[in-house]
């Protein structure tokens, strides 16, 4: 009875250690997701709706399929689908585009776009148009043609904490944001990262005009802030000051510690499991020897 209780206790300890190891891995996964490319920035849905099973729904599904497939080979594309179902025209063409952040790999771009397309069913259910902007990419569709049309409407804006000492640095990085895709890093008194991007359907002139508006609004709205984001309908500008010098290192150290703890816990669990197997083997050894001797005895008496 004592051996049975001991083996039960040892098995319980092993299960707890394995649970701790899984918990560590979940923590690491949750920490990694903080910078997930699918983290939402903003979304908008048109007020109009389409009916389930309608020709427009078929056109929209075809549009989404084209967008998802294209994202694996290109960071930007636009499509227009106007198919028919049972010979009936939908009455509307489905127009759509996607764009990934300039520094994303095609693998991450494809994952981001596919993830956003899945979000539409919950965010904009059966609406004739919608747009979802996440950290890594943008996907937009509508029944009216917006391809190549400039849009400088403010879709989202956000400013960080105020620090008047960084005003000159902010002005310097904002001056460096230009062109279809811009990334600026200044490593003097502060570490500064700035990014800007236009949607790929805009001409160079439209892009410059849109970015000029975004940067001006960012300069006015977030004056003296350590970070700022300004997303217009067809472009965005954003910057961060002094926030990425130490934070990535700390996050890396934290992740390493979590992984090391999970590995140690797994090793301890395996060692204890070996002891448990050895313990149970030795516990049943006398019984197995007795059964073997009994078998030999029975054969000898026959």
Image (tube, rainbow, N blue to C red):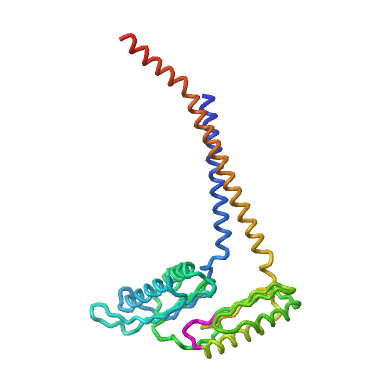
Q: Which residues are magenta?
A: 196-203
Q: Position of residue 253 (x, y in %)?
A: 65, 56
| 280 is within the stretch colored magenta | no
Q: Position of residue 38 (x, y in %)?
A: 51, 68
Q: Residue furthest right?
A: 165
Vertical side of 49 occupied by 258: above or below = above
Residue 65 seen in render:
yes
Give 114 or 205, whichever is nearer the viewer.
Answer: 205
Image side of residue 142 versus residue 301, left or right? right
Residue at image position (62%, 84%) is: 215
Predominant secondary structure in magenta? loop
Q: Quadrant of residue 225?
A: bottom right
Q: Quadrant of residue 182?
A: bottom right
Residue 157 seen in render:
no
Residue at image position (47%, 22%) is: 285
Q: Residue furthest left?
A: 87
Q: Position of residue 105 (x, y in %)?
A: 50, 69
Residue at image position (43%, 81%) is: 47
Give 251 or 92, whichever is nearer the viewer.
Answer: 251
How many marks overall? 0
- Quarter of the picture holding the C terminus: top left
Image side of residue 34 versus residue 168, left or right? left
| 201 is within the stretch colored magenta | yes
Q: Position of residue 160 (x, y in %)?
A: 66, 74
Residue at image position (59%, 44%) is: 264
């Amino acid at each position: 009875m004592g051996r049975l209780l001991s083996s039960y206790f040892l098995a319980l300890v092993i299960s707890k250690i394995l649970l701790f190891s899984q918990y560590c891995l979940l923590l690491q996964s949750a920490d990694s997701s903080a910078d997930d490319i699918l983290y939402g920035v903003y979304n908008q849905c048109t007020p109009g709706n389409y009916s389930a099973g309608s020709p427009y729904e078929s056109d929209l599904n075809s549009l989404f399929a084209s967008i998802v497939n294209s994202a694996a080979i290109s960071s930007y594309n636009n499509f227009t689908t106007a198919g028919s179902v049972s010979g009936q025209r939908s009455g509307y063409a489905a127009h759509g585009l996607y764009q990934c952040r300039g520094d994303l790999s095609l693998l991450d771009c494809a994952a981001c776009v596919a993830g956003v397309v899945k979000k539409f069913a919950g965010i904009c259910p059966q609406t004739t148009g919608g747009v979802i902007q996440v950290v890594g990419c943008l996907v937009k569709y509508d029944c009216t043609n917006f391809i190549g049309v400039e849009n400088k409407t403010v879709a989202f804006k956000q400013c960080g904490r105020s620090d008047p000492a960084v005003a000159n640095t902010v002005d310097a990085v904002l001056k460096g944001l230009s062109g279809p895709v811009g990334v600026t890093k200044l490593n003097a008194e502060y570490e500064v990262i700035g990014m800007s991007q236009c949607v790929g359907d805009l001409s160079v002139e439209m892009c410059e005009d849109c970015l000029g508006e975004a940067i001006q609004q960012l300069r006015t709205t977030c004056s003296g802030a350590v970070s700022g984001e300004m997303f217009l309908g067809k472009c965005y500008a954003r910057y961060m000051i002094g926030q990425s010098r130490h934070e990535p290192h700390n996050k890396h150290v934290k992740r390493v510690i979590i992984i090391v703890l999970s590995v140690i816990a797994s090793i301890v669990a395996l060692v204890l499991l070996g002891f448990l197997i050895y313990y149970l083997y030795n516990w049943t050894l006398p019984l197995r020897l007795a059964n073997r001797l009994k078998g030999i005895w029975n054969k000898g008496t026959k």
